[in-house]
Image (tube, rainbow, N blue to C red):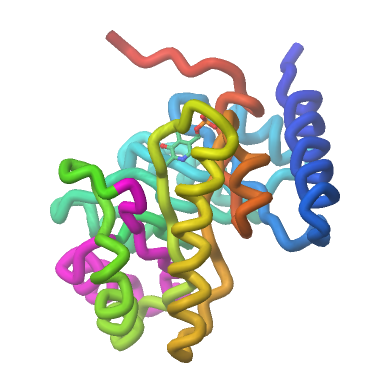
Amino acid sequence: MTMIPKQLKAVQARIHAACQAAGRADDSVTLLAVSKTFDADAVLAAFEAGQTAFGENYIQEAVQKITALRNLPLVWHCIGPIQSNKTRLVAEHFDWVHTVDRLKIAQRLSEQRPAHLSALQVCIQVNVDGGPTKSGVTPEDALALVQAVKALPRLQVRGLMCIPELATDCVAACALFKRARDLFDALNAEGLTLDTLSMGMSADLEAAIASGSTMVRVGSAIFGARHYPA
Ligand SMILES: *Cc1c(COP(=O)(O)O)cnc(C)c1O
C-alpha cells in the first residue's frame, strides 16, 4: 500500500501551519511535488490524492513519465540543470522551467517551443549563497537577465528560483531565503510583474514560507527516500 496520500496530506498540513505562523493565506503557496526517481505509478498515486503540479530534474526520465501520463491534467515543472542539447526536449514537454540562468538557454527554449503550445513559464535561477561553482545568476545580474528573457516571444517570466545550501539552523536558512525575497521585491519595484518565488524543499519549507516563498518543491517528504542507481 502506498504511503503517498498520507505523506502528501502531512506536507499540506506543514504548509498550512507555516502559512498560519506567517500570517499568510494558504493559497499564497503552491506545492510542487518533486517526483524525480519515482515512477509514473507514484505520480498517479499523488494525482489521485489531489496533486497536479510535478517537478522533475532529469529530462529523459521526465519525458517518459510525461508521455505515459499525458491524458491526465498535470502541470510539469523542470527543476534540473539544463544543457544546451536538452533544451528541445524541455521546450516540447514541460509547462514550466525553474532553472534558466543564461540567456543562451532561454533563447533556445523560446526558439524551440512548439507553436501549438502556450508560452513556456520561466523562473530565473539565482545563486543567493554566492558559491562560485553553483548554478544561478548572481543577484546583481538578475535584473538584466529577467529583462532579456522577458523580450523572448515564447517564454513568460514568472519569477525567481533558488536552492540555498541546507543551512544549519532556521535563522541561517531564513537569512538566505530572505535575500531571494528581497531581490524578488526589488525586481517588482523596478516594474516587473513577477508572481512566483520558488524556494523551500522537504527539510526547510517552513523557513522558506516564513521568508516569502510562493512555491515549495517537495520530494522525499511526499514520495519517500530516493534511491539512485549505482
Ligand atoms: C530534488 C529537489 C527538490 C526536492 O528535494 P526534497 O529534499 O526531496 O524535498 C527540490 N528542488 C530541487 C531543485 C531538487 O533537485
Is 86 situated above or below 113? above
Q: Is residue 100 left or right of residue 53?
A: left
Residue 158 visible in image: yes
**Left or right, residue 116 beside residue 41:** left
**Of residues 156 and 47, which is closer to you in this image?**
156
Q: Quadrant of residue 119?
A: bottom left
Q: Position of residue 26 (x, y in %)?
A: 81, 56
Of all residues shown, which one is farthest toward the bottom?
191
Eyeballing the image, is 155 above or below 102? below
Figure quadrant of the C terminus = top left
Horizontal placement of 26 versus 167: left or right? right
Query: Residue 65 in magenta?
Result: no
x then y, percent, for residue 66: 48, 45
At x 55% / y 29%, what residue is drawn?
169
Considering only vertical position in the picture, is 97 above or below 188?
above
Is residue 169 depicted above or below 140 in this figure? above
Task: Tell me the quarter of the image containing the N terminus.
Answer: top right
Place of residue 181 in the rendered image (x, y in percent of width and height, measured from the top left): 52, 62
Residue, far front: 171
Q: Position of residue 90 (x, y in %)?
A: 33, 56
The answer to whether one can see residue 72 in this image is: no
Q: Which residues are magenta?
A: 101-129
Q: Residue at x 42, y 70 (%)?
A: 120
**What residue is rendered at 50% in x and 38% in y?**
172
